[in-house]
Image: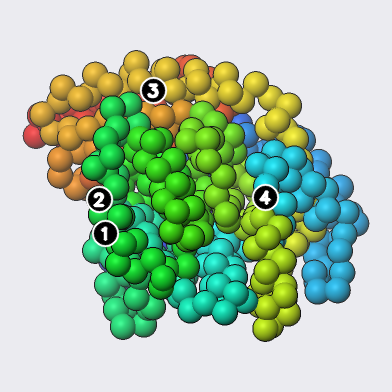
Amino acid sequence: MKLYDINFDSKHIWHPYTSMTSPMPIYPIVGASGVELELADGRKLIDGMSSWWSAIHGYNHPILNQAAIQQLMKMSHVMFGGITHPAAINLCRKLIDITDNKLECIFLADSGSVAVEVALKMALQYWQSLGKKKCHFVALEGGYHGDTFGAMSVCDPNNSMHSLYEGYFSKNFFIQAPKYSFYEKWYPDDLISLKKILNKYADKIAAIIIEPIVQGAGGMRIYNSNYLASVRKLCNDYHILLIADEIATGFGRTGKLFACEHSKITPDILCLGKALTGGYLTLSVTITNRHIADTISKGKAGCFMHGPTFMGNPLSCAIAAASITLLMNSPWEKLVKDIEIQLMTELFPLKDQPQVADVRVLGAIGVVEMKMPVNVPELQRYFVAKGVWIRPFGKLIYLMPPYIITNKQLSKLTQAIRDIVIKQNNK
């Protein structure tokens, strides 16, 4: 039996967003260390994706490895119903310390999508407990909040899987995405679409859910911080909750510890995931304020109605706590700022290329948007041949490297992007 049988994998294993009849090429990874992934044939790839935003410290980190080993020797899992443990308490204490002091009640969930499901349910139960029938949500066009049903119901209705399940979702309201970028002057006309919905339907709306500053999988758009600040004010004015989906942006990725800090706002409900465990295990959290938690608890159900089997998994909690400590004890702000400067220097010249629509950079995020969709398998093969791991989608070729990446390693990533963009333009 082959240990890395690609034919078996292609025939039997479903990968994300991939056809079983015409699967995309896959690359067997046998190890990872620092910012490098090791292929089965021994080649090393510099990782430009942080395993979809999560591996901010790189791979095989000795401190996180030790946290995992120490917890594993005690217990890997125990149910959270009627039980607590030091790993969960330690993690939640750290989360309360680093998030806004108004956010103090934490629900430990499984994944980013589940954190969003929990946030939506919190909002619904909150209004139910107050005797109000507010059961719809407002979300942005171009937004992405996960692949489970509740999360899909607040994802972009036109450019996602949403349309495949039409008729199964609750009906929500979608507003135009903010049009002014992070570095542009902002104008209040950005709010016209939202104000129209609020003026007409505020009494039916439980919450607005938004990805702060960066719309991730919906197009890697980076919008003006004044927009988010204005949304917060409108939520207050119309008595609507604000859910901030920071699953992708949390833990320093945008240059602030949390992207909401760019706008100096506090959401009513905050979702975190991805980088929470440094990319080691799946874990997410949904954090809310005491008023919402108490209101739900005093409602008809007498509790919050959600409880995953692996909620508060000790192994995940222990690693997450170690990851937060590692981050907070590191010069992460300087590391992210240095990455931002280098991405700007090395990617911005691509704006002059005829097939490039835009280049965007914020923190440790760099995006080259092409005018036409790219051939993902073709570009993937090219990048692997160049010794880098970059996973494009749609029209986007983008980077979100681990914070520990060196200048030389980052230049290898940006050079590969520059080379392929120029090559595409010369076709």
Marks 2 and 1 in Cβ contact (< 8 Å): yes
Q: Which mark is residue 196?
A: 1
Q: Which mark is residue 103?
A: 4
Marks 2 and 4 in Cβ contact (< 8 Å): no
Under circle 1, the secondary element is helix
Marks 3 and 2 in Cβ contact (< 8 Å): no
Q: Residue at x 61, y 25 (%)?
A: 332
Q: Which mark is residue 343?
A: 3
Number of the front mark, 2 or 4: 2
Q: Is residue 143 left or right of residue 296?
A: left
Question: Mark 2 and mark 4: span between their CA atoms?
Answer: 30 Å
Type of the residue with mark 3:
Leu
Front residue of 285/12: it is: 285
Q: Earlier in the sequence, mark 3 or mark 2?
A: 2
Q: Which mark is residue 215?
A: none
Question: Mark 3 and mark 4: span between their CA atoms?
Answer: 33 Å
| Residue 178 placement (x, y as % from top left) | 29, 44
Q: Earlier in the sequence, mark 1 or mark 4?
A: 4
Number of the front mark, 3 or 1: 1
Q: In the rendered image, which residue does mark 2 sit on? A: 192
Residue 38 visible, this orientation: no
Type of the residue with mark 1:
Lys
Front residue of 178/62: it is: 178
User: Badge 3: how crowded within 10 Å, few (<14), some, or many (20+)?
Assistant: many
Number of the front mark, 3 or 2: 2
Question: Mark 3 and mark 1: span between their CA atoms?
Answer: 38 Å
Question: Mark 1 and mark 4: span between their CA atoms?
Answer: 30 Å
Question: Mark 3 and mark 2: span between their CA atoms?
Answer: 33 Å
Under circle 4, the secondary element is strand
Under circle 3, the secondary element is helix
| Residue 246 placement (x, y as % from top left) | 52, 48
